[in-house]
Image: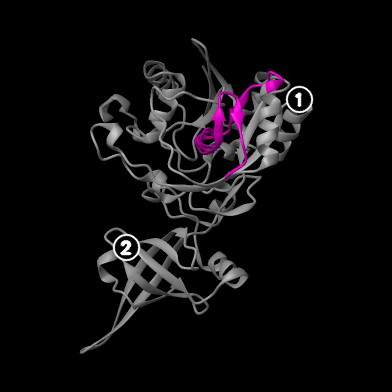
Amino acid sequence: MKLSDFDFDLPEELIATRPVRPRPAARLLLAQGKTIADRHVADLPDILRAGDLLVINTTKVIPARLTGQRHRDSAQGPVSAKIEVTLTEPQPDGSWRALAKPLRKLAQGEQIIFTDALRAQVVARNAEDVMLRFNLEGDDFDAALDAAGQMPLPPYIAGRRAADAQDREDYQTVFARTPGAVAAPTASLHFDAALMAQLRETGVEFCEVTLHVGAGTFLPVKVDDVRDHKMHAEWGQVTAQAADQIMAAHRAGGRIIPVGTTALRLIETAATGPGQISAWTGKTDIFITPGFKFQLADALMTNFHLPKSTLMMLVSALIGRERIMEIYAHAIAKRYRFFSYGDSSLLIP
């Protein structure tokens, strides 16, 4: 499999920089078998069946993007420089792995001052990122980060506009509960409380899992042979209750439908065999490409993905590469909105 197998041309004006309102007003491309239908997310109660199980990711995006000043003493006097930091992963010792720009202006031992309340020391500088230790911990750190940070919008949005107060709501799911993600599980952004209530009334059930989406989700694939690509690892958890719920729905004949690639990757990591899953906690770097044998997912609700991305490979694995190219050609022709704040699809093999 070559990287070029998952490429397509996307008109730049189809990249969404704001979501539609209300959330379920987003369009939904329904690909079922050999058919394609243009619907809306609000139509899900008419599309799904009683007994279907939607697997949702309850991770909560933290305001991980910070802007501060690096201060250094020199022979000519104090020198400062603006530093942009994006937190990517907490470490067991309380420090944080982070991306920094410009990375070359940071040295081990230096301090970055973000606000009067929040500052960090560079405890290590690596080839691509840094390790930071903040002056605060626990609830005090969370409060200071909430005050100082911005939502870490994906590069294709951040390159077009700065994050603002509206993104605090827009880039968070209505069922976000467990802080730790630096990117949203974007397929879930289309749900609101009213739609979820409607779905429950029709007999559709929800199952909650957690996968903290990392910044690696935006890293490009740099190898021509996709088998050589190394996936980033992300922390996730499937509780015993969630595993039991998935197994019960499967035994009863309901379809297991992850909402987003994060939920799909997590349950396929925790799967122990066809239709089988156990409680699981840990880091997953599962890489799903064509030829993958799905153990649990019967369908997938997901937004439209970047060309040549690992997520294009995942949806190709689920529904076929030629088929996904037909679906994306239809979406482009019909002017669907792409990527994190864009429209959605429901892919049913």
Whether 18 is drawn above or below 99: the answer is above
Identity of the amino acid at label 1?
Gly
Q: Residues within 10 Å of mark 1 (few under 14, many from 20)?
A: some
- Magenta part of the chain: 251-280
Instruction: Measuring from the top left, give residue 7's x and y in whole percent.
Output: 30, 28
Please, which colouring scheme is shown?
one colour
- Left or right, residue 178 beside residue 31: right
Residue 101's disc is: 2
Circles 1 and 2 in contact, beta carbons < 8 Å: no
Residue 192 visible in the snapshot: no
Q: Does the stretch in magenta take in 269?
A: yes
Q: Residue at x 53, y 25 (%)?
A: 295
The quarter of the displayed image where residue 291 is located: top left
Q: State the residue in front, 294 or 26.
A: 294
The quarter of the displayed image where residue 229 is located: top left
Q: Residue at x 52, y 59 (%)?
A: 63
Please name which of the two marks, 1 or 2, marks the residue nearer to the observer: 1
Q: Residue at x 54, y 51 (%)?
A: 167
Instruction: Measuring from the top left, give residue 105's x and y in whole percent.
Output: 26, 70
Q: Residues within 10 Å of mark 2 (few under 14, many from 20)?
A: some
Identity of the amino acid at label 2?
Lys
Instruction: Measuring from the top left, give residue 118's x and y in whole percent.
Output: 50, 75
Q: Residue at x 58, y 33 (%)?
A: 259
Q: Secondary structure at mark 1?
A: loop
Whether 126 is drawn above or below 34: the answer is below
Check disc 1 and report the residue beneath it. 203
Q: State the residue in front, 329 or 112.
A: 112
Of mark 1 and mark 2, the one earlier in the sequence is: 2
